[in-house]
Image (cartoon, helix red, strand yellow):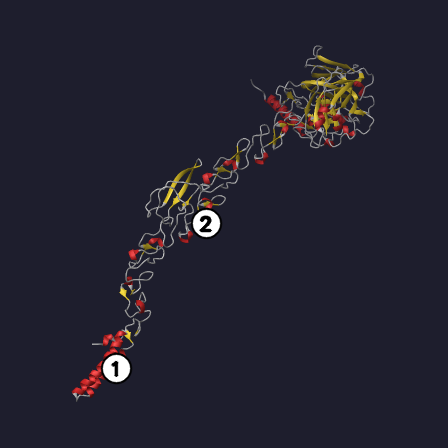
Amino acid sequence: MFFSCERIFAAILILTTSLALSSAYCKSKIYFGKKKCKYLCHCKNNTNCNKSTGLCSDGCAFGWFGPACQFKSATFFPIANESDFDWLTDNDPTTCNKGDIQEITVELNTSYPLTWMRVMLNRPIEFDSLEIRYRTPKDTSKDQVCSDAQTAKVDNVTFDLSCPTLDLVSHVILSGSGVGSLCSLDISKGRNIAIKQDARQSSTFKKWYARGAVDGDYGPIDGSEKKQKTTCSHTSNRHSDAWWSVVFSAAMHVQSFVIYNRRNPSREKCCEFRLSQFSLKAYKSTHYSRKTQVFNFKDQSSEAQDVYTIIPSPRIGHTVKTLKIAEGQDFNILTLCEVIVYGDSACSSGKFGLDCERDCNCINKQETCFVSTGGCPSGCAPGFKGEDCWTQCPISTYGKDCKMNCSSNCLNSDCHHETGVCKACVPGYTGELCNQECPVSTYGQDCKMICNTRCLNCDCHHKTGVCKTCVPGYIGDLCDQECPISTYGKDCKMKCSSSCLDSDCHHETGLCKACVLGYTGELCYQASPPQGDLTPSDRALVAELEPATDVRVDRLPLDPFTLTTVRKIVNFRGTFKQIYVIFPLECPVSTYGQDCKMNCSTRCLNSDCHHKTGVCKACLPGYNGDLCDQGTFGDGCNQNCSIYCLDKLCNHMTGKCNNCTVGMEGDYCNESIYAAKSKACGYNLAVLSAFFPTSLVVTIVIFCVFYAIVLRCCRDSCENLLGCRYLS
């Protein structure tokens, strides 16, 4: 099949025009809606509403209420002695009943069938004590009770009440203690279900299109022709049997009709009269026939009216799909400036909304919610609230009526609005409700952090990672600090052995890094390990065991010169613990000093000296002193001090005497202070021998006398250990 260029161009032009019209709809400030922006905003102070939802940020204009401010509130006046009842219609929860009124009766300006109403109370707990009754024009003295009454909570102070009636209602009575908490009352007349619907007419005069009668604009009061062309409908006078119709997008429940006639004061009797004696018929389908007709109205007045209000009585019991208005008196012209149809959607079970496009969200899934609001008599499904039961619980709340609080361990107190399952946990917690601490060895956000391996059993605080206890040898919040010098073990409470050099030992085991003079071994201790159980005199270091009393452990025979640390596992009160049994170990015999590397003096008896200082415990015969080194000097003490050194004490390096014996002098005490005397004795004897040569007898006598004198002198000198070396 082939298309001409003209047809293709025409199709494109139609599509472009359609899109332009659709765009024009959405650009208007007074409309909203996701589909063609087909609903009117009714916001306070004529402010703009949300273009998608119709929500008015500052509230509804006076006379409107409900979802998106789409429902018209019936006008009424209270019947009571008090004249100040403005608080009942101002939709202000802060202005409420201040008197001791227990019953309020309001009379509708125009009798109307009831569908539902909304009340606000400043003490919502008293809502259940609020009773609703009504009266009909047929019998204004008889109170009737709503037979199919249902209620739904909108918020903490607002409640909706369903009270459908077929008959017109003239009075509404509120009674009970709940009246004392009453703040406002709205009685629904329905919403305009005709606006922006599919309007048609028998013919069109110039640009007075059929859609002008359902655009929400009532037309100018001054009758300006230019303005009316865009807001009113007008058929051509060239065709007889003029009519106008509107087809609803879905079947609707209808409560009333309001028709605005063309008003043109500047042209008296020009146009208004054309509408007199018109007819209005409602059909349950798009086919016009008696079988589908569900309502028929014929204007009986001879004078045309500016506004017609038609309230079916009883209320139309069937849904309406099509409405048709026809001219009367054979004028062949029909002009309408606005047609308003108050009613509501006839949604199937489980649906609600302006176009029945939304699902009910009730606790009872089989329940039918209010088609006007979506409110649920049984309450909103867990996790939701609001007049339509589709507003999610605020952050930090969840569950039925949003009364449950999210776990304080939920990150930012944010949990799933239905189940309470946390979207994320604060550091240190895990689980759906974040009510479980991180498993042992983990901590922090999502428990992804690993405890320091120096935490005992890898166990740390689930939030901060601070170790609950450190493995032996470490301290600090994160067990990242070794024990200070001189301490070791669990909590660094153990003291290093005093035999450790500088009291410095391994921070975990207590093993000395080096020993002070006189000690050796890993712990710088000395002991001959006993057999059997520990005794009070034994020294034991116990790790990971509190208290350390009543501990018994088998001892192993050990060579005292080998490693003396024994690691044993004992059962203490049903729990296996690790202990250390430590035996002291001193330097072996014949050694002493740092690491026992020094040898005791060979002059020590049995080569046995003090393990620290090297002082001999006893000396070999002929030696004395701490090191048995008196009387010698030089390398290895292998040279003897001079016999003339007092007490045989000399410098251990040079051999110089500390002091000399009597009669000796010099560094080594080898010079006699009597040497001159010896020489003097010898010299006189010789002189005398030479002096008396002539007389042998005399010489011998004299020699003997002097010899006796010298001999005595020498004897005295020898006795004093002086000058003996000069005797021949």
Pick whichever, 524 or 419, lies toward us: 524
Where is 421 relative to 287, above or below? Answer: below
Amino acid type indicated by mark 2: Pro
Residue that appears at 71% across and 31% down: 59
What numbered label is drawn on residue 680?
1
Q: How many marks?
A: 2
Does the rendering let one see residue 33? yes
Residue that appears at 42% across and 49% down: 496
The answer to which quarter of the image holds residue 667 is bottom left
Where is 297 relative to 476, above or below? Answer: above
Q: x and y percent of residue 244 in the render?
A: 73, 18
Pick whichever, 631 or 397, lies toward us: 631
Q: For the residue labelled by badge 1, is the local secondary structure a helix, a strand or a loop?
A: helix
Local packing at callout 2 (Cα closer than 10 Å; few below 14, some 14-19, many 20+) is some
Q: Quadrant of the C terminus?
A: bottom left
What numbered label is drawn on residue 484?
2
